[in-house]
Amino acid sequence: MSEAQWERTLTVTTAEQTHALAAAVGGVLEAGDLLVLTGELGAGKTTFTQGLGEGLGVRAGIISPTFVLVRIHPNLPDGPRPGGPDLVHVDAYRLDSAAEIDDIDLENTMDTAVTVVEWGRDRVEHLSDSRLEIDLHRAVGGEHPETSTGGVVMDFDTDDDDEPRTIVFRGFGPRWTEAPNILETSEYGGN
Ligand SMILES: Nc1ncnc2c1ncn2[C@@H]1O[C@H](COP(=O)(O)OP(=O)(O)OP(=O)(O)O)[C@@H](O)[C@H]1O
Ligand SMILES: [Mg+2]
């Protein structure tokens, strides 16, 4: 894979800030965009996707697509971006290869939607000549050092306690020659 054209790292301290940052990103996305979300279990990939959905103005109800691999959230005519792209939300955790991704036929919706793939790294890059990579990390050495050991997060508890996250954005391909302006700020959290 080619090199990223730019990289921006933002830190947030609450799930609400992750949501707000993602909503701002959703506001600048266009039909055809491909987003590849990476991060350990519970890092916040679905939380981020919910924020994207708000910024895109698509039908609510974004959940972890545990058994359903793909969900389409249509753009709402009375939302913030009427006539804007739909959101296609994919969880590729159980898909082992690009071949299995091809079976679910994302090409069909790519042109009219923003396609967001949790666990998409090394599985969906072939779908587009451009992509936005978003990596979410529990901030090791942050407010809850007891939850990590040598950088390996041991605590996969599912409670909703707010924790810091580091969110790294990377742009690839002609669509993302420049980082969006909304990433050039620390207004979302604790940078
Ligand atoms: N700063 C934060 N950003 C995002 N989520 C946070 C943050 N702090 C705490 N959380 C909590 O962490 C959990 C993240 O869950 P989420 O389903 O978004 O993760 P995920 O990466 O999609 O997990 P999976 O790998 O199971 O799909 C939520 O319960 C959320 O409230
Ligand atoms: Mg998820």
Image (cartoon, helix red, strand yellow):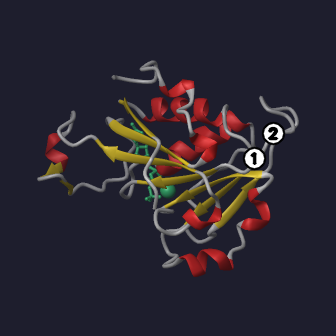
Q: Quadrant of residue 23?
A: top right
Expressed as whole percent of the image width and height from the top left, the position of residue 129 reads 62, 57
Q: Quadrant of residue 116?
A: bottom right
Q: Look at the numbered discs 1 and 2 and tell me whether their residues touch, using CB distance below 8 Å.
A: yes
Residue at the location (62% across, 46% down)?
A: 174
Looking at the image, tell me whether mark 1 or mark 2 is earlier in sequence order. Answer: 1
| Disc number placed over residue 77 in the picture, else none | none
Q: Which residue is mark 1?
A: 31
Query: CA separation, marks 1 and 2?
Result: 7 Å
Q: Which residue is mark 2?
A: 84
Is residue 155 depicted above or below 55 in this figure?
below
Query: Type of residue at label 1?
Result: Ala
Compare residues 112 and 163 and report the one nearer the observer.
112
Indicate the quadrant containing the C terminus: top left, top right, bottom left or bottom right. top left
Q: Residue furthest left?
A: 150
Q: Residues within 10 Å of mark 2 (few under 14, many from 20)?
A: many
Expressed as whole percent of the image width and height from the top left, the position of residue 5 reads 47, 42
Label 2: element kind: loop
Q: Nearer the viewer, mark 1 or mark 2?
A: 1
Expressed as whole percent of the image width and height from the top left, the position of residue 153 reads 22, 54
Q: Residues within 10 Å of mark 1 (few under 14, many from 20)?
A: some
Q: Is residue 191 left or right of residue 22?
A: left
Expressed as whole percent of the image width and height from the top left, the position of residue 1 reads 46, 62
Query: Type of residue at label 2?
Result: Gly
Q: How many numbered marks appear?
A: 2
Q: Quadrant of residue 26?
A: top right
Compare residues 135 and 89 and report the one nearer the observer.
135
Is residue 55 depicted above or below 188 in this figure?
below
Residue at the location (57% across, 58% down)?
A: 117
Is residue 124 depicted above or below 116 in this figure?
below
